[in-house]
Image: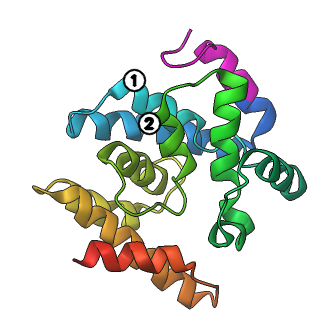
Amino acid sequence: KMDYTKSSKDAILKWLKQNLTEQRLSHSIGCAECAEELAKQFNLNEKKAYTAGLLHDCAKCFSKEESLSILKENFPDIGKDELCNHKTLHAPVSAYVAKTEFGVEDEEILSAIRWHTLGKLDMTDFEKIIFLADKIEPNTRDLEYRGKILKHLAKKGGLNDALLTCYKETIKSLVKRDLKICPLTIEIYNNLQK
């Protein structure tokens, strides 16, 4: 079986193939490999990072109704912030699926999956690398954007600079597309600016 789960890697991949689009599966594998590399770079647990990366989007293709129903039942304290954009619903739901479907009990993995889209204030280094791996994995992500982030990661103290750059780019992109910016995003951005 795979570390930190009750399932084998083959069983997990089979489930992901059945529940994700081909592109989303490719993204998940890319994220797992990227997370593993970042964990190595920042002296964190590589097997744990791989597991979190592989499962981070496992509920991405659930219907909005199914996601909301899982959230209502299992995350009674979920904030309005997270519910304001259907694109962020899958993060807590994926943490729930990682726990119930694959037996992941490690709190660090579950929290990293839970917060990989919006992020949160004062993320741990482990949460930061899963957040970043999701944004910069090479299989489906923009290479120019990836390059900007990797440049920061190569420097001393680069984790927070990389994170700040991510938030800057996200905010710019939301403004450009005339989309609502989640108050939490702005709060994290301001906090990283310090």
- The residue lying toward the viewer, choosing from 60 and 119, is 119
Report the magenta residues as a range.
1-15
In reply to whether residue 8 is colored magenta, the answer given is yes
Q: Mark 1 Cα within 10 Å, few/some/many (few <14, many 20+)?
A: some
What residue do we see at 64% from left, 21% from top? 103
The spot of residue 111 in percent (x, y) is 50, 43
- Would you say residue 120 is visible in this rendering? yes
Q: Which mark is residue 47?
A: 1
Circle 1 — which element? helix
- The part of the image, by quadrant, that contains residue 164 is bottom left
Q: Is residue 11 left or right of residue 40?
A: right
Q: Position of residue 44 (x, y in %)?
A: 27, 33
Cα separation, mark 2 vs mark 1, equals 12 Å
Would residue 83 appear left or right of 138 to someone viewing this image?
Answer: right
Mark 2 = which residue? 108
Q: Nearer the viewer, mark 2 or mark 1?
A: 2
The answer to whether residue 23 is visible is no
Q: Residue furthest top?
A: 1
- Which amino acid type is shown beneath numbered disc 2? Glu
